[in-house]
Image: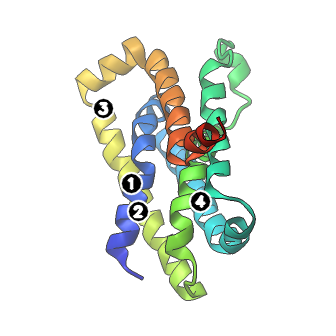
Amino acid sequence: MNYGVLALTFLSVNLDFFFMLIFLLKKYSLPKVMLGYLLGNLILLTASYFIGQILAAFLPEWILGILGILPIYMAFRDDDDDDDTKTHRSPVLSVLITYLSVCAGCNLSIFLPVLVGETMSNFLITLLFIGVLTVLVVFVIKWVADIPSVSKLMTDHGEKLMKICYVLIGLYVFWDSGLISHILSWI
């Protein structure tokens, strides 16, 4: 297994989500964000490894672009509940669901070819390697989020910026997966 390729794949697939981590770290505690993000990465890597062959055989990549609707939906859903009604929600689950809805299509389509044909022992080492990268990234993002100018920007405009990010990420998933070009080819 080429760890440089793994690191580059992880960084490129998660680059758009790094900005979202700033918002999540402002909303939830560091350990809960880290656990939700780590679980999301491990779930998607495992899915890529175990069902990769089946997914590639039955679903063209452009269909995964439909997942772009999830972050767009999250941007427009009414989130004006009182804080006391949100306390029953698990922050770990919220981070996990956010990550899966934003990054599932890209992760599956990009990690799938990287992990196809790997042995179980190489896959387990890959999980460990990506897990370490995930933890390091959360610490770096937390450090960036604590910079006063970044903190002020998030306090003043964080909610609007997060909604804009969700829409842009959803549109990017539509485009990157080939969904848009596939639909345009029908016209």
x, y percentage for residue 56?
67, 67
Instruction: Say if mark 1 contacts mark 2, CB within 8 Å.
Output: yes
Q: CA distance from mark 2 to mark 4?
A: 11 Å
Q: Nearer the viewer, residue 151 or 43?
A: 43
In the depicted structure, whether residue 68 falls above or below residue 166 = below
In the depicted structure, whether residue 50 falls above or below residue 97 = below
Earlier in the chain: of badge 1 and badge 4, it is: 1
Residue, disc 2: 9
x, y percentage for residue 100?
62, 47
Residue, disc 3: 146
Q: Residue lying farthest front?
A: 187
Please give the name of the residue rendered at 45% of the width and 30% of the height, measured from the top-left corner.
23
Q: CA distance from mark 1 to mark 2?
A: 5 Å
Residue, disc 4: 108
124 to the left or right of 94: left
Residue, disc 1: 12
Q: Amino acid at mark 3?
A: Asp
Q: Quadrant of residue 147?
A: top left
Does dot 3 land on a helix, a strand or a loop?
A: loop
146 to the left or right of 46: left
Does dot 1 land on a helix, a strand or a loop?
A: helix
